[in-house]
Amino acid sequence: MKEKNYYILASQSPRRRELLKKIIDKFDVWISSIDEDSIIADNPAELSIKLANLKMDEVLKTNKDLLEKIANENFREIIIITADTIVSLSNKIYSKPKDREEAYKMIKELSGKIHDVITGYCVYAVKSNKRICEYEISQVKIKALSDSAIRDYAEHSDCLDKAGAYAIQDMLRYSEKINKNKFFDIVENYSGSFSNIVGLPLEKLEKTLKNLI
């Protein structure tokens, strides 16, 4: 009798790992790295899927021998998941800031506006050679902030490893704060999938997995 499926999340993001645990009990984490800055597309949604696809190609290529070994074991299917999340305003893409000055500029541009958060993902069933790639779009509005508030945020928050220089799940619970009563909370509201904004649209991903397997 064959065992359950073997799941692999090919992502360096600890946030995606925590999200995936909500719908899959056990999975391996593999690292997928490509030169994202060199990839172009006609629009942010297309770029997110293109990046997820390229990450999948890279994982399959660099782990070919290991996948063949796993395929010989008693698993029903081997499922690999890749994803890429993009913050976009008027088709301008906001990646992870290189430094705190760039973080300041990003939040200043996003301040008072509604922007898109797009996660493209690919799911690949190794044994049946089936791949499905989708994307989800949510929207976030950053509060209209003063220059001093933006500067405080950019200089004291944990924003450097976040696309768009912020993480919605961190609002109201930063360990770093200016004083005892002032926490960083720069998000006014959002619409759409919350998990998509964090890095993986769980609702849509679950449906994709059911359609794939």
Image (tube, grey):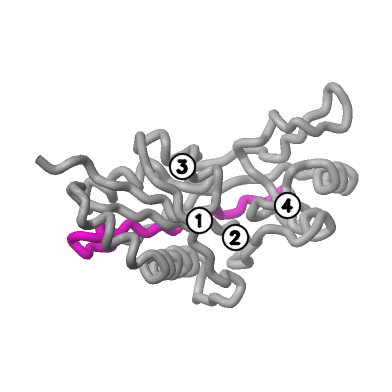
Q: Residues within 10 Å of mark 3 (few under 14, many from 20)?
A: some
Between marks 3 and 1, how big is the CA–CA gap?
10 Å
Q: Mark 3 or 4, which is nearer the eye?
A: 4
Q: Mark 4 or 2, which is nearer the eye?
A: 4
Residue 145 relative to residue 209: left or right: right
Between marks 1 and 2, how big is the CA–CA gap?
8 Å
Pinpoint residue 61: horizontal percent, then vertical percent. Answer: 38, 71
Looking at the rendering, the stretch of residues picked out in magenta corresponds to 112-131
**For the residues bearing labels 1 and 2, Cβ distance under 8 angstroms:** yes
Pinpoint residue 1: horizontal percent, then vertical percent. Answer: 9, 40
Tell me if residue 209 comes above or below residue 133 in the rendering: above
Main secondary-structure element of the magenta-colored stretch: strand
Three-letter amino acid code at disc 2?
A: Ser
Badge 4 element: loop
Residue 190 relative to residue 130: left or right: right
Q: Earlier in the sequence, mark 2 or mark 3?
A: 2
Please say whether residue 126 is one of the residues in the magenta stretch: yes
Three-letter amino acid code at disc 4?
A: Leu
- Give the residue number, with chain letter if any, for mark 3: 193
Badge 1 element: strand
- Give the residue number, with chain letter if any, for mark 4: 160
Pinpoint residue 208: horizontal percent, then vertical percent. Answer: 28, 50
Q: Earlier in the sequence, mark 3 or mark 4?
A: 4
Please say whether residue 188 is one of the residues in the magenta stretch: no
